[in-house]
């Protein structure tokens, strides 16, 4: 084998943390268009997925997210202005580079009294407007009661350079812009895209909110593997939408869509030896196994 046993053990422990959602992998479901007005219209977000940002033990911000094939839609609900000021932000890595610092393709979006954006850097307030010409964040906050605790955002795919089926990096954030930043995923950091979640821009609807990797029946063989391995699942009539392979840094190194029913053959001969995490999406379900490649 190309690596020693102690290196393999270290790799397995690292990948177990990846497979255990240290950096979550989510699906952004396909849904109906939303209106970015800050009003939670009945039924408007029923087809969205959700994540939760913890502000304090008693205060949370729920983030709803979906797309309509050409726009990304977000809703931040809960403890925003009423939580001693929390402004919603979106951190986006269209290439899912999982880099340790910002790259030119990375985006920062911010909504407060104005709507702000920056590509390649974060927390740049030189390009803020009451209304941006090509994306929307509403309503803008005004000081004092009544507090603004619901803000909705709409960003065109064409602006951020993504499309259906893409795998991207992202993190949701609320901040007072001075000394407090709260994130989803909780371990995310604004300056480190390698700490952000991985998100698949789904080409179909997803049935439940933010699914943890579970232990539903899934076979992967041979393991360890050299050259290729096969994934089999329990119901050949219900094939997965996506099969992904992540390295120890959480980067997607293989991605296969609409695998043939019953099993999926994954070619790995060009990958370095190490420990990887195989993730299978099927409707609203997600399953994982780690695999050693030598």
Image (cartoon, rainbow, N blue to C red):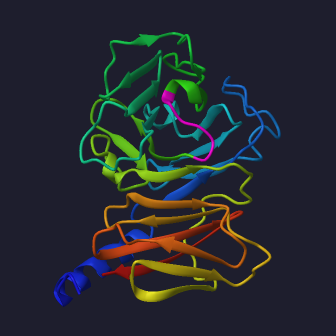
Foreground residue among 160 and 222 = 222
**Residue drawn at x 74%, y 52% as measured from the top left:** 205
Is 165 left, or right, of 87 in this rendering?
right
The C terminus sits in image quarter? bottom left
**Quadrant of the rendered image containing residue 248:** bottom left
The N terminus sits in image quarter? bottom left
**Residue drawn at x 52%, y 59% as measured from the top left:** 255
**Residue 277, relative to residue 83: is it above or below?**
below
- Residue 75 shows in this picture: yes
**Residue 163, relative to residue 246: is it above or below?**
above
Is 129 left, or right, of 191 in this rendering?
right
Identify the main secondary structure in magenta. Answer: loop
**Quadrant of the rendered image containing residue 265:** bottom right
Foreground residue among 130 and 229 = 229
**Quadrant of the rendered image containing residue 92:** top left
**Residue drawn at x 31%, y 81% as measured from the top left:** 12
- The segment highlighted magenta reads 160-165
Residue 190: percent from the left, percent from the top? 32, 41
Does residue 36 belong to the magenta stretch?
Answer: no
Is 281 left, or right, of 161 in this rendering?
right
- Residue 148 shows in this picture: no
Residue 83: percent from the left, percent from the top? 47, 37
Residue 11: percent from the left, percent from the top? 27, 77
């Amino acid at each position: 084998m190309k690596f020693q046993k102690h290196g393999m053990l270290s790799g397995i422990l690292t990948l177990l943390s990846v497979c255990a959602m240290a950096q979550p992998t989510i699906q952004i479901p396909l849904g109906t268009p939303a209106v970015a007005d800050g009003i939670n219209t009945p039924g408007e977000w029923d087809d969205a997925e959700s994540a939760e940002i913890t502000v304090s033990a008693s205060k949370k911000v729920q983030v709803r997210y979906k797309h309509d094939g050409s726009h990304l839609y977000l809703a931040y609900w809960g403890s925003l202005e009423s939580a001693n000021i929390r402004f919603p932000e979106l951190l986006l890595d269209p290439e899912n580079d999982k880099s340790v610092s910002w790259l030119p393709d990375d985006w920062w979006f911010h909504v407060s009294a104005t709507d702000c954006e920056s590509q390649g850097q974060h927390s740049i307030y030189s390009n803020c407007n009451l209304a941006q010409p090509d994306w929307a964040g509403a309503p803008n906050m005004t000081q004092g009661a009544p507090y603004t605790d619901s803000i909705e955002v709409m960003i065109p795919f064409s602006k951020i350079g993504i499309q259906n089926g893409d795998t991207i990096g992202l993190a949701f954030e609320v901040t007072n812009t001075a000394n407090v930043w709260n994130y989803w995923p909780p371990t995310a950091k604004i300056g480190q895209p390698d700490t952000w979640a991985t998100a698949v821009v789904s080409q179909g609807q997803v049935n439940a909110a933010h699914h943890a990797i579970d232990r539903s029946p899934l076979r992967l063989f041979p393991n360890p593997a050299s050259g290729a391995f096969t994934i089999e699942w329990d119901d050949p009539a219900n094939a997965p939408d996506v099969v992904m392979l992540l390295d120890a840094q959480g980067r997607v190194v293989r991605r296969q869509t609409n695998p043939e029913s019953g099993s999926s053959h994954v070619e790995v001969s060009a990958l370095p030896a190490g420990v990887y995490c195989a993730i299978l999406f099927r409707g609203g379900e997600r399953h994982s196994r780690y695999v050693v490649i030598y």
